[in-house]
Amino acid sequence: MTALFQPYHRQSFPLIIAAMVIVAVVTAAFAVVLALTEPSPAQREHAEQVEADEKMLTAFASTFAAEQAIADFALAQGQAFLAAAAASLHRNLMAGADMATLLRFAEQALRLEAIYLLDAKGQTVGRSGAQSQPEWFRDLPEVKARLAKPVGTPWVKRVPPHGKGVEPLYVMIWPRPKTQGSIVMVQTAEDFQLVSDWSSLYTKFLERFLDSSPTAVYIALLEPNNLISHVISRDAGEVGRLKRAHKPFKVLAQSRQPQVSELASTRGERLIEICYPFHAAGERLVEGAPPRGILIAGFRVTATRRPFPNLAPAFVVGVILTGLLLGLIQFYGRRTAALTTARLEHDTQNILETISSGLLAISNEAVIVAVNSRAEEITGRGRNRIVGQPYQRAFEDEKELNYVLLDTLHNGRLYSDHELAFRKPDGTTVPLRVSTSRLELSGSRPGAIALIEDISEQRRLEARLRRNERLSAMGQLAHGVAHEIRNPLNAIEMTAQHVQTQFAPADAPHREKFDRYVRAIREEVRRLDLIVRRFLEIARPPESSLSNVDVNGLVEHALLVEAEEFTRYHIQVVKQPGTSVPHIKADKAQLQQALLNLIINAIQAVAALPKDAPRVIKLSTAFVPAQAPDEADGVEITVSDSGVGIKPEHRDRVFDPYFTTKQSGTGLGLALVYSITLNHGGLVEFESAPGAGTTFRWLLPVEFGETL
């Protein structure tokens, strides 16, 4: 993150040089004037006071300019970040995202007072955070003119505290190129990443100046709009006079040197008034650069008379003090810059951490400059290892992700909700959704930023929803078809039985053959009836008979039933019963049937292994407490095997009815497990890889009817 805050350090040295040049020029000018003229004692005393007051005001203006440079830098950083946020918001809206959700997210993530979405006619089509207050910003003349004639550049305006609050606010307008509309954001000065509140900053500096000068009566700040925004005075009468009788800003700004005049105060005292135009760092040396403001200070004329002193010692002391003052200015500037940089870095990182998506930011040289915790979790790479590294080196194996972000950096192409497969360092592959935008950094060419989301859980939920929809459709089909099939089957069964008793041949050879054919017919009828009943059980499980079920006892019973199969295939069984596993409210017969199907599936998987391969089946139970108030407590039964595993192309069809890879299988076992689990409000998941075995995790709620 430190790379984002480097431009300020390049400004501190020119600031000191400019201050030194200003002090040197002013000092030299006074030395020449004193050397060429021989004023009277009164004139000398007056000139000495003017010189001292000008020096004090000049030094104060230099410090004031240094503080304003820091505030300007913080303002630029806030504008760059909010501009990137506005561009991302516009792209998501154009992509069809939900307007209300996006505006609410932008308000919370950016800590906005309010956000408005305007169409090409300036009408509000969406807003957040402003339901309880009118759109007061429309009454501001500059905002009204901006909305009446929109242009394609961002616009930021600071406004004083209005009737609804006590803090200065910023109104920001960003254009929406494709819709000809605008995005209007309202944010407090503090949340706009300023060093401190403007009013407080100026007031404290003006108070500090007044306290440091015993002859100063007042000091005020005249802004380019011809308004005195801040004034501190020892005499309340001077405040009103200043606001009525000050010269226009343009007149005072024509001279690049301080303007000195003598006037009478409201109490009849003689005052020296000095008007000093001040500039930001480095701007005073640029020909034609307008000042940022004008400091107007009034000093009381001392009435005492004293001999004109020798200026040589005073000049030497002044030079020494000036050097010390410049040293203090430099130290204070660097210290303030360091604190501001650290604060901005900390606040920016906090903002990045609140984003639910992973964030990667690269500079114009394709070096990673920012990563949030979510991106670390998604990519499996810690920020300490990749921040400051070339982007292609950090993700050298991920060609598609490299192409997307570098295409945005070098070609300006923006991606929205682009999906790709990403391989983590541990070898797992996850689906990602990536959106990119340009990253505007102060003082350098644009970089690029990517928001990444792991959509694995979304894919799993979509697959589960599709499977549930298929089961629902099967249930509707089964209900109608079962009746139509069972009636003919019953008729065939009864007819075969009637034929066997009424029309059997008398002779023994023909009778035996006749009975064999009739038995074959009746057996096939019964087999068809069994298939229909199993199909109905999968599509629409029968009514549950609930009781308290001991999960550990359920596992013990299932292992006892399949004990002969374990011996037959030389299978090692590992039991890991959990402690404090509660009884659950469920249909014991259905759970027993589902658990047996899972164990039979594991037995068939290890039976296909070579004879010398280890054949192991592990069964464990555990209590799973609820993780959220709207979740239920549950128990977990895990069935693991060291078998052949499930091929990737078969993973999505494992729970489908009649899908099987075994020659003698019916494909109904795991489908029945899924149906019973769904009926109990539980979950069944598996992890598998070819040749590495399979693990089924079967979760059931403690109370029947609750949902995990």
Image (cartoon, rainbow, N blue to C red):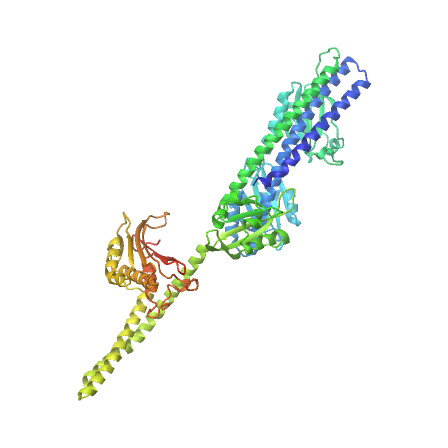
Query: Residue 433, percent across and down?
Result: 51, 55
Relative to 690, is 296 above or below? above
Farthest front residue in view: 612
Relative to 232, is 82 above or below? below
Farthest right residue in view: 36
Instruction: Evaluate whether residue 268 shows in this view.
Output: no
Quarter assignment of residue 558: bottom left
Query: Residue 216, percent across and down?
Result: 66, 21
Query: Residue 5, percent across and down?
Result: 60, 39
| Nearer-the-camera pick, 131 or 252 | 252
- Side of 604 where 155 appears, left or right: right
How many numbered discs, if any?
Answer: 0
- Side of 240 where 360 appears, left or right: left
Relative to 566, is 508 above or below? below
| Nearer-the-camera pick, 562 or 302 | 562
* Quarter occupied by the N terminus: top right
Instruction: Evaluate whether residue 622 shows in this view.
Output: yes
Query: Residue 400, percent across and down?
Result: 55, 56
Relative to 108, is 284 above or below? above
